[in-house]
Amino acid sequence: MRMGKPLLLAVAVAAICAGPAGHATAAPARHAAEPYMTGIWEIYPDPFAGDENTFKELPVPGDGPHLKEPYATQWKALRAERDAKLKAGTPLVDASTLCLPEGMPTIMGAIFPLEFLQTKGRLTVLAEFLSQTRRIYLDRPMPPPNKLVPSYYGMSIGHWEGDALVVTTRGVKEDVRFFEIPHSGDMTITERIRLTAPDMMEDQITIDDPKMLVEPYRFTYGYKRNDKYQIMEYYCDREDPLFKVKPDGTIEMKSISEIK
């Protein structure tokens, strides 16, 4: 479940400053062939543009996964239950409302802005939502499967192919779910991240998981650079700052007094 961004920003963000005035800092040194991706990136087009709905479920990207049975039937039933609860105004609890990291590839959905930082040997992705950090290590081998420690973001290894940063991610924990889609410990996520214009970027994502999927699941996220935006602190301290979990497993928005 995702909260409509216009309302969430109104509640959680009283004012966003463009940052202190002063001289612009020089861009960090990087290989001449690398496109400049450092900056603040917002999802584009904005799925919440002009929508003040408090509770809104983002659509499953692409055409959705082609899961094997019985996973396909189980997943469709779960999505139907979520949709029904959402329409009733009582959405089901999910990882984010339990203050858990989104993990991969959900973090790249950028419901709140992402900050990309290019440094030597690494691209770091910082998410405003829950102050998450994802690290993409460049030009090094992927550890063998028995050396991977399952984690929310997995191990991400990248290299440049022309103007595209090609990233392979493995070792995502099996209980980390992207739109409730099940996956095995053998899942591999491949990304091709590239600038489509000086301030526009896309991330072509392919999920391979032969144990669960009939065929690879492909979709693309688009982003627009907005370096006037200042990333703010967004932490969960044992409970979501804006929602509360009810005994029946659904969630509701806190009152103004509870938020304060």
Image (spheres, grey):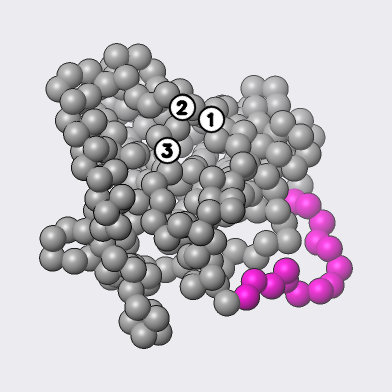
Find out whether residue 24 is within the magenta segment. yes
Residues at marks 2 and 1 touching, judged by CB atoms closer than 8 Å: yes
Of callouts 2 and 1, which one flags the residue occurring earlier in the amino acid sequence? Answer: 2
Q: Amino acid at mark 3?
A: Pro
Q: Is residue 191 shown above or below 83?
A: above
> What residue is shown with label 2?
62
The image quarter in which residue 237 lies: bottom left
**Front residue of this view, candidates 152 and 57:** 57
Find out whether residue 16 is within the magenta segment. yes
> What residue is shown with label 1?
220
Q: For the C terminus, which image quadrant?
A: bottom left
> What residue is shown with label 3?
59
The furthest residue to the front: 88
**Image coordinates for residue 179, horizontal then vertical, percent:** 33, 39
Q: Nearer the viewer, mark 1 or mark 3?
A: 3
Q: Is residue 81 visible?
A: yes
The main secondary structure of the magenta stretch is: loop
In this rendering, position of residue 40 left or right of residue 77: right
What's the residue at 41%, 51% (across, down)?
56
How packed mark 2 is, by other alpha carbons closer than 10 Å (few <14, some 14-19, many 20 or more), is: few
Q: CA distance from mark 3 to mark 2?
A: 9 Å
Q: Secondary structure at mark 3?
A: loop
- The residues colored magenta run 15-28
**Front residue of this view, candidates 23 and 46:** 46
Q: Amino acid at mark 2?
A: Gly
**Front residue of this view, candidates 34 and 181:** 181
Of callouts 1 and 3, which one flags the residue occurring earlier in the amino acid sequence? Answer: 3
**Front residue of this view, candidates 254 and 162:** 254
How packed mark 1 is, by other alpha carbons closer than 10 Å (few <14, some 14-19, many 20 or more), is: some
- In the rendering, which numbered label is found on residue 17? none
Q: Secondary structure at mark 1?
A: strand
**Image coordinates for residue 231, horizontal then vertical, percent:** 60, 64
